[in-house]
């Protein structure tokens, strides 16, 4: 921590606040004593200028379009790593050795089954329930089945519940899809990779063997890597806030899933493909770009813009390359990709988007790929949640294992009525 100070002059008093510099990125002004020493709060709705915690997991430079996981650039991890290896990296400090990766993968593989009674939960949902509604309910219910790993003060319990969450998300998500189409659930197959297992549980049927397409398995594994973690985004902050009260990890991840569902966040991949389908052909793009620029029109280009990235989201670059890979592997063409490509090109050359530094984000192309693989749009955010569980769990562990962590309890700028006396009903 640096010995530099920032001085605030308020109500005649000068307050020096320590300034800290991390290993990279903006300095932070430590305002923890600000209220005690000034009687005033700082004010930052939406946390546009607020660092909520110290973390060593993920670093984003929004201006340069840089994303690092424990220092490793996302482009290198997407090209050379696997989702299991990135999961290990996020949960520990370093990339695993071959033996460490084998042990980790073995452990995760053997936690993929769900309690048989938990599988009954699905019967309580309508067949047309949104998979994210099911994910919220079933993941939250995990805490009813795993009392043996909810003592968050015990590192071993934290480790087991972390592994259980990472391992069971593919089974839960695949079952949500199967339930929606009236097909039987498939049990996990421990001979398959993490992503291969998910593909089989999703698209396989009991009546015949399921052949995993290696290029699709690789592409989906890479998509999981791209979604694994992303600093203190809305859903991760939700998980941290829930965890700060001592809530069990299953309940915290269920809270993260609920937050991710929003169209401004993880729900944008579903919204982006729906938007592209609504636009239809490239000749309609100018009309939609004008709508996105119209202050009186709530329409926004879904999959565009980002709170942090004011440059290209490096994940979107990998996604665009993956579209071509999947289309070639499946020998499919979908005109929606050309519409997406032309929309991106027109928006990036439009002064409004240039001035506001709005670029495609991770959600812009992901739906095109997932749709080509065969997922319905309603499953897109469930896949995002599947992958982001690794980041949520790693961030939760980082917070809980910090001996100095406190319950999160923001204050407010109160603008309601000042104190007044009750008026009896017959006097109103
Ligand atoms: C994710 O935080 C993360 O890291 C999230 C995420 C992760 O991995 O966890 O990266 C995943 O959530 C990606 C973002 C997915 N959401 C979308 O694609 C939805 C569309 N995008 C927007 O809603 C918006 O860009 C946000 C929500 C993503 C960011 O909003 P901000 O930072 O609050 O910015 P803003 O709404 O204040 O916008 C700034 C200006 C506004 O215009 P003015 O009021 O200044 O005139 O840009 C405009 C906005 O109207 N704007 C857009 C726009 N996004 C912002 N205009 C048209 N289309 C858009 N998509």
Image: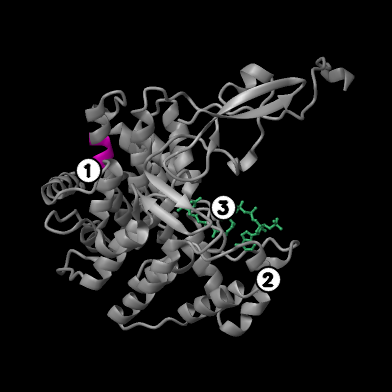
Marks 1 and 3 close (CB-CB < 8 Å): no
Residue at label 2? 351
- Is 252 situated above or below 216? above
Tell me the magenta residue range: 160-164
Q: Residue furthest front?
A: 3
Counting from the top left corner in percent of width and height, residue 392 is at 38, 42
Residue at (48% x, 53% y) in the render: 61
Counting from the top left corner in percent of width and height, residue 371 is at 40, 71
- Secondary structure of the residue carrying numbered label 2: helix
Q: Is residue 95 magenta?
A: no
Q: What secondary structure predominates along the stretch shown in magenta?
A: helix
Task: Give the number of the mark in front: 1 or 2.
Answer: 2
- Is 154 situated above or below 182? above
Residue 35 showing in the rendered view: yes
- Is 385 situated above or below 294? above
- Is 272 situated above or below 342? above
Residue at (38% x, 52% y) in the render: 68
Q: Which mark is residue 116?
A: 1
Task: Give the number of the mark in front: 1 or 3.
Answer: 3
Nearer to us in this view, 182 or 314: 314
Residue at mark 3: C-beta within 8 A of ligand 1? yes
Residue 128 showing in the rendered view: no
Residue at (32% x, 76% y) in the render: 325
Taking the image as shown, residue 70 lies to the left or right of residue 409, namely left
Crowding near the residue tagged with mark 1, few <14, some 14–19, many ≥20 C-alpha atoms within 10 Å: few
The residues bearing labels 2 and 3 have C-alpha atoms spaced at a distance of 19 Å
Ligand 1 image-quadrant field: bottom right
Residue at label 3? 307
Query: What quarter of the picture does the C terminus occupy?
Result: top right
Taking the image as shown, residue 162 lies to the left or right of residue 133, namely left
């Amino acid at each position: 921590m640096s010995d530099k100070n920032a001085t605030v002059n308020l109500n005649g008093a000068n307050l020096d606040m320590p300034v800290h510099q991390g290993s990279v990125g903006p300095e932070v002004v430590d305002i923890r004593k600000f209220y005690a020493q000034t009687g005033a709060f700082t004010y930052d709705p939406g946390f546009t200028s607020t660092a909520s915690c110290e973390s060593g997991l993920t670093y984003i430079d929004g201006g340069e379009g840089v994303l690092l996981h424990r220092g490793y650039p996302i482009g290198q991890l997407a090209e050379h790593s696997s989702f299991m290896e990135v999961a290990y990296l996020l949960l520990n400090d370093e990339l695993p050795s071959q033996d460490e990766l084998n042990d980790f993968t073995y452990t995760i593989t053997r936690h993929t089954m769900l309690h048989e009674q938990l599988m009954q939960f699905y019967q309580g949902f309508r067949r047309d329930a949104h998979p994210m509604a099911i994910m919220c309910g079933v993941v939250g219910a995990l805490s009813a089945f795993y009392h043996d790993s909810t003592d968050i003060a015990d590192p071993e319990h934290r480790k087991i519940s972390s592994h259980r969450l990472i391992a069971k998300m593919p089974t839960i998500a695949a079952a949500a899809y199967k339930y929606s189409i009236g097909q039987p659930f498939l049990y996990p197959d421990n001979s398959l990779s993490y992503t291969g297992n998910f593909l089989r549980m999703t698209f396989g049927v009991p009546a015949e063997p399921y052949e995993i397409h290696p290029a699709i398995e690789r592409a989906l594994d890479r998509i999981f890597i791209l979604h694994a973690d992303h600093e203190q985004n809305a859903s991760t902050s939700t998980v941290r806030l829930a965890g700060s009260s001592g809530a069990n990890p299953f309940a915290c991840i269920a809270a993260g899933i609920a937050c991710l569902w929003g169209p401004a966040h993880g729900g944008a991949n579903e919204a982006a493909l729906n938007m592209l389908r609504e636009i239809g052909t490239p000749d309609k793009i100018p009309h939609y770009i004008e709508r996105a620029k119209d202050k009186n029109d709530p329409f926004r280009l879904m999959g565009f813009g980002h709170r942090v990235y004011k440059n290209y989201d490096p994940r979107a670059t990998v996604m665009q390359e993956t579209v071509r890979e999947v289309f070639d592997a499946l020998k499919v063409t979908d005109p929606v990709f050309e519409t997406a490509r032309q929309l991106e090109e027109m928006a990036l050359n439009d002064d409004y988007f240039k001035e506001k530094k709005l670029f495609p984000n991770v959600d812009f192309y992901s739906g095109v790929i997932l749709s080509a693989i065969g997922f319905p749009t309603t499953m897109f955010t469930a896949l995002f949640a599947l992958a982001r569980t690794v980041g949520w769990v790693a961030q939760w562990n980082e917070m809980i294992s910090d001996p100095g962590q406190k319950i999160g309890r923001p204050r407010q700028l109160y603008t309601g009525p000042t104190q007044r006396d009750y008026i009896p009903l017959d006097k109103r």
